[in-house]
Amino acid sequence: MFLFRNVPNVAAFSARATRSKSSTTTAFHARKTTIVVRAMSADAGPRDLIDLRVGKVTKCTVHPDADKLYVEEIDLREAEGPRTICSGLVPFMKEEDILGKNVIVVANLKARNMQGVKSHGMLLAASNETHDKVELLVAPENAKLGSRVVFGDAAFNGEPASANQVQKKKYWEAFGPELVTNGEMEASWKEDGAVMRVELEGEEGDEGPTFGSVKCESLTNALVG
């Protein structure tokens, strides 16, 4: 995880955030409990436990009380509507460089309040070693919004962990350091080189959905966080 030293409590390229939640139903609690149990199974690994989703940035403005933060609204095709996410990207890119992009969201991080703005999640971006150049990870224009990101051809083993479990068990700390870009600017898993892929709309093949890779603009062999 890369930290912006000049922005308190802001993690690399993004800040985790919180959004208010309405009261939940018994069915929701039952579903949430099931997810935790499955995610904690012996066969689940870091790629199973962290929930990466494709979202489109529909709004991007500078935080009213933190000039190094953007406040974005991200469409993940969720029933609750767009998520609000704060990202420490102001020093690295303009609002128009973010607006309208299909981005990768870490969707199961613990809720936080960033300088008075409630939001939930984190945008992934690549950085050079000196952290003075940062680029968003971007999915293809026809990526299926709300779909879960996969690595290579591997299938998921169960459901992702809950936000509470991610924090308590430090799943992100195990997951984050494994994210890099390869020589083609594609986001990938460091250990085995599996490329981060997303489902594409309207391109179903004979063997099911078609997938496209997630890339940054120019950074090769870079850190991701």
Image: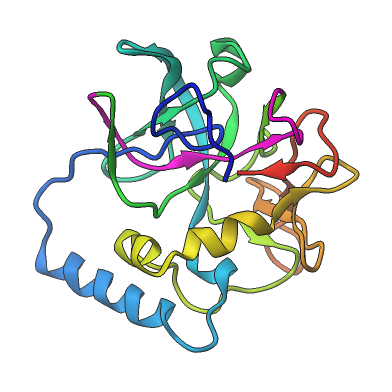
Name which residue lies at 85% across and 48% down: 182
Q: Quick one: which residue is furthest to the right in this view?
A: 183
Question: Quarter of the image holding residue 34?
Answer: bottom left
* 156 shown above or below 130: below
Question: Quarter of the image holding residue 38?
Answer: bottom left
Q: Which residues are magenta?
A: 116-132
Answer whether residue 130 is magenta in the image: yes
* Rendered location of residue 151, percent (x, y): 69, 62
Left or right: where 8 falls relative to 30: right
* 59 shown above or below 3: above
Q: Quick one: which residue is furthest to the front in this view?
A: 5
Left or right: where 62 falls relative to 116: right
Q: How is the image coloured?
A: rainbow
- Total marks in image: 0
* Rendered location of residue 222, percent (x, y): 78, 41
* Rendered location of residue 4, percent (x, y): 53, 29
Left or right: where 151 falls relative to 118: right
Left or right: where 88 falls relative to 92: left
* Rendered location of residue 99, percent (x, y): 54, 18
> Which residue occupies the foreground of this view, 165 or 201?
165
* 193 shown above or below 5: below
* 210 shown above or below 7: below
> Which residue occupies the foreground of this view, 194 or 31?
194
**Image quarter (top left, top right, bottom left or bottom right) of the C terminus:** top right
Name which residue lies at 39% across and 34% down: 9
Answer whether residue 2 is magenta in the image: no
Q: Quick one: which residue is furthest to the bottom in this view?
A: 42
Name which residue lies at 39% across and 63% down: 166
> Which residue occupies the foreground of this view, 141 or 99?
99
